[in-house]
Amino acid sequence: MRTNLTNSSADHIVLVGTGEAAMAALWRLRAAGAHVRWFADRADVGEETVLAHALGGGRIELTFDDPLSASLDGAAAIVIADQRDRHARLAERARASGIAVHSAGTAGLSASTPAGLVRAARAAVGAA
């Protein structure tokens, strides 16, 4: 399978989860200036959102929708920082669409490295 981290129509990184690994990924992506669509699974993320937004340009789109039914249009990569098995379907759908998948906090399960995601984030910012 071929993964294209520099898809010219891609303009954001999808982040799924709200744990420690998700926060580390959010901070790293925002520091790179990425546009992030964040699927949070709890409502008390206001402070994290404000602090992450202050890190760089771009935007954070916060949503509480189910990521399994969400459109992946425009996604440069997906970071799954939630270890629930139900997100395996999301990862498979993303990979089938040629979107890189990174499992934050789980060694060996990612199609890309954190550095690769930062490159994808920068490419997405350039495309937007």
Image (tube, rainbow, N blue to C red):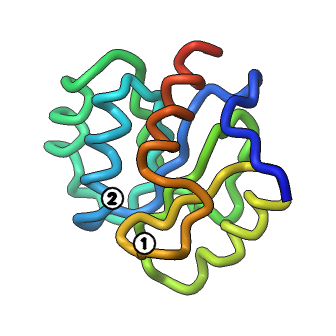
Q: How many marks?
A: 2
Quarter residue 126 falls in:
top right
Q: Position of residue 56 (x, y in %)?
A: 28, 20
Depicted 86 relative to depicted 33: above or below = below
Residue name at image x 75 percent, y 40 percent: 4
Q: Secondary structure at mark 1?
A: loop
Which residue is identified by label 2?
22
- Please report contact status of discs 2 and 1: CB closer than 8 Å, yes or no: yes
Residue name at image x 47 percent, y 59 percent: 16
Q: Position of residue 13 (x, y in %)?
A: 54, 40
Q: CA distance from mark 2 to mark 1?
A: 8 Å
Q: Secondary structure at mark 2?
A: helix
Q: Position of residue 23 (x, y in %)?
A: 26, 54
- Whether residue 70 sits left or right of residue 46 in the image: it is right
- Whether residue 14 sits left or right of residue 94 in the image: it is left
Furthest-bottom residue in this view = 85
Q: Amino acid at mark 2?
A: Ala
Q: Amino acid at mark 1?
A: Asp
- Whether residue 4 sits left or right of residue 127 in the image: it is right
Which residue is identified by label 1?
82
Q: Residues within 10 Å of mark 1 (few under 14, many from 20)?
A: many
Residue name at image x 71 percent, y 33 percent: 74
Quarter residue 87 falls in:
bottom right
Depicted 32 relative to depicted 25: above or below = above
